[in-house]
Amino acid sequence: MIETNSTNEEFSLVAKGREFLDQGDISSAVKCYEKAFDPEAMDETEARSMLIEARSHLSRKHFLEALESFEEALLMGTDVQRRQALDAILNIAEIRSRVGTLTEQLGIMLEEIATQWPIVRESIVFVSEDENVVLLSRDAVDKIPGHLAKASRISRLPQHLADRELPIDADRCVPYADEEDLRFIVELARALASYKEPEDL
């Protein structure tokens, strides 16, 4: 988080807005976010940088990092920038509301593959029910076919995960937000399941 001149009250409103957002109470979240503004801390240039940074995180589906940057823009931006930030925050909230269902679907699909090829359970691992990310073990990354390994859907860990203890040794992941992402992850799982060591060829 960057340093701003915003008061503790402004930050408290953002924190409360995030809390409501996490609970799925969008209308209450909006009320808090709309009030979270300190005119004395307004910095159009910095807010623009935060919006650019947030959109970069969003393009990688790193939602927590995107939210934090959009919230920064909300605190210090112009009316137009604040509206852009709030619209983006609501968009993220809408996407995150589907993550639980997607995680359940993906878990079923991966388990069907892992029933025949148990190695998949060690190669592609969920972080938690709240995260829209599956981890790829370092060993798995080395075995992914070239056309899949180069796919933009595979990314480095989001910062908030890079600092955490993870269930497997991993520095790559696949964030997911829609059915297409799930199909890609299943394709990865099948590729790993059919992998043969060079001496086995």
Image (spheres, rainbow, N blue to C red):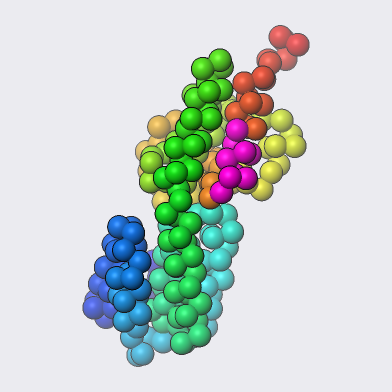
Instruction: Please identify the quarter of the rendering in which residue 196 is found.
Output: top right
Q: Can residue 194 be seen from the camera position used here? A: yes
Q: Can residue 69 be seen from the camera position used here? A: no
Magenta: main secondary structure equals helix
Q: Residue at x 48, y 57 (%)?
A: 95
Instruction: Please identify the quarter of the rendering in which residue 10 is found.
Output: bottom left
- Asked whether 149 or 96 is in front, the reply is 96
Residue 128 coordinates in the image, percent (x, y): 38, 40
Give the vertical position of 15 relative to 194 (above or below): below
Give the vertical position of 150 relative to 159 (above or below): above
Q: Residue at x 67, y 19 (%)?
A: 194
Q: Residue at x 53, y 50 (%)?
A: 177
- Asked whether 21 or 42 is in front, the reply is 21
Give the vertical position of 59 relative to 111 (above or below): below
Side (left or right) of 52 relative to 197: left
Magenta stretch bounds:
178-186
In which quadrant of the rendered image does the N terminus lie? Answer: bottom left
- Asked whether 3 or 53 is in front, the reply is 53
Residue 181 coordinates in the image, percent (x, y): 59, 44
Residue 87 coordinates in the image, percent (x, y): 48, 73
Check residue 183 for magenta coloring.
yes
Q: Residue at x 40, y 32 (%)?
A: 167
Instruction: Please identify the quarter of the rendering in which residue 180 is found.
Output: top right
In which quadrant of the rendered image does the C terminus lie? Answer: top right
